[in-house]
Image: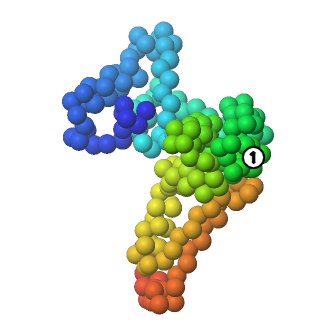
């Protein structure tokens, strides 16, 4: 969806993108379409990536697709790949992969598996962590994490993000004594 109606300044859109946006905005307010209960479904990972006027339209409704729990992730993993696939292409059995993919949607998990097949790779814990990090950075938490990453980078610190076994994240920021921020800089940073 973000490629059809991205949250970008109209001046930076191509004429075709502007035309698509105009049509979608008109459709979202067209009394004839509204009276006939015609529904247009658009799926996106994040509403923040879409045109704000379209998202705020009085006829637009947000429907959250709940992320699968561990049992649902396991059932999905077992349905889309055989035990032989896991034995030959993955360091992780489906049960462990279901734990490590906490917070991911079925689509994202499917992309992880498809990427493994397409690249001829072996699915490793590191690959799952990298994919999960990418997912987190591109979603709502990504803004906060990108700010933390920018601060860490500015102070030559290291940032390590890893999923917790039962869901959630562990975020470690390490400052070396030689690069630690001076006290007066810490205060300014904390109040910024």
Q: Nearer the viewer, residue 82 or 27?
A: 82
Residue in view at x 45 percent, y 44 percent: 48
Please determine whether, in this image, residue 61 is positioned above or below residue 148.
above
* Residue 182 seen in the current view: yes
Q: Name the residue under label 1.
A: 93
Please determine whether, in this image, residue 86 is positioned above or below residue 156.
above
Q: Quadrant of the N terminus?
A: top left
Horizontal side of residue 9 vs 185, given as left or right: left
> Residue 66 location, x and y as percent?
65, 37
Please determine whether, in this image, residue 42 is positioned above or below residue 158.
above
Colour convention: rainbow
Give the crowd class for mark 1: few <14, some 14-19, many >=20 residues within 10 Å.
some
> Residue 63 location, x and y as percent?
58, 32
Residue in view at x 54 percent, y 33 percent: 62
Residue in view at x 44 percent, y 78 percent: 156
> Residue 35 location, x and y as percent?
47, 11
Q: For numbered disc 1, what is the local secondary structure?
A: loop
User: Hey, which quadrant is residue 6 in on the image?
Assistant: top left
Residue in view at x 43 percent, y 13 percent: 33
Horizontal side of residue 178 vs 78, given as left or right: left
């Amino acid at each position: 969806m973000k490629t059809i109606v991205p949250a970008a300044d109209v001046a930076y859109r191509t004429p075709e993108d502007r035309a698509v946006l105009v049509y979608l905005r008109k459709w979202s307010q067209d009394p004839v379409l509204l009276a006939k209960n015609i529904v247009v479904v658009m799926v996106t990972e994040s509403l923040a990536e879409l045109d704000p006027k379209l998202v705020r339209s009085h006829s637009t409704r947000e429907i959250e697709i709940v992320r699968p729990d561990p049992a649902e992730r396991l059932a999905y993993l077992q349905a889309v790949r055989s035990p032989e696939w896991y034995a030959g292409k993955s360091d992780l059995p489906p049960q462990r992969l279901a734990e490590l993919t906490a917070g991911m949607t079925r689509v994202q998990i499917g992309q992880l598996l498809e990427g493994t097949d397409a690249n001829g790779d072996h699915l490793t814990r590191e690959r799952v962590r990298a994919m999960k990090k990418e997912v987190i950075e591109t979603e709502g938490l990504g803004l906060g994490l990108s700010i933390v990453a920018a601060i860490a980078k500015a102070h030559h610190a290291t940032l390590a993000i890893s999923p917790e076994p039962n869901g959630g994240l562990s975020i470690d920021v390490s400052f070396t004594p030689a690069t630690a921020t001076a006290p007066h800089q810490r205060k300014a940073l904390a109040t910024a």
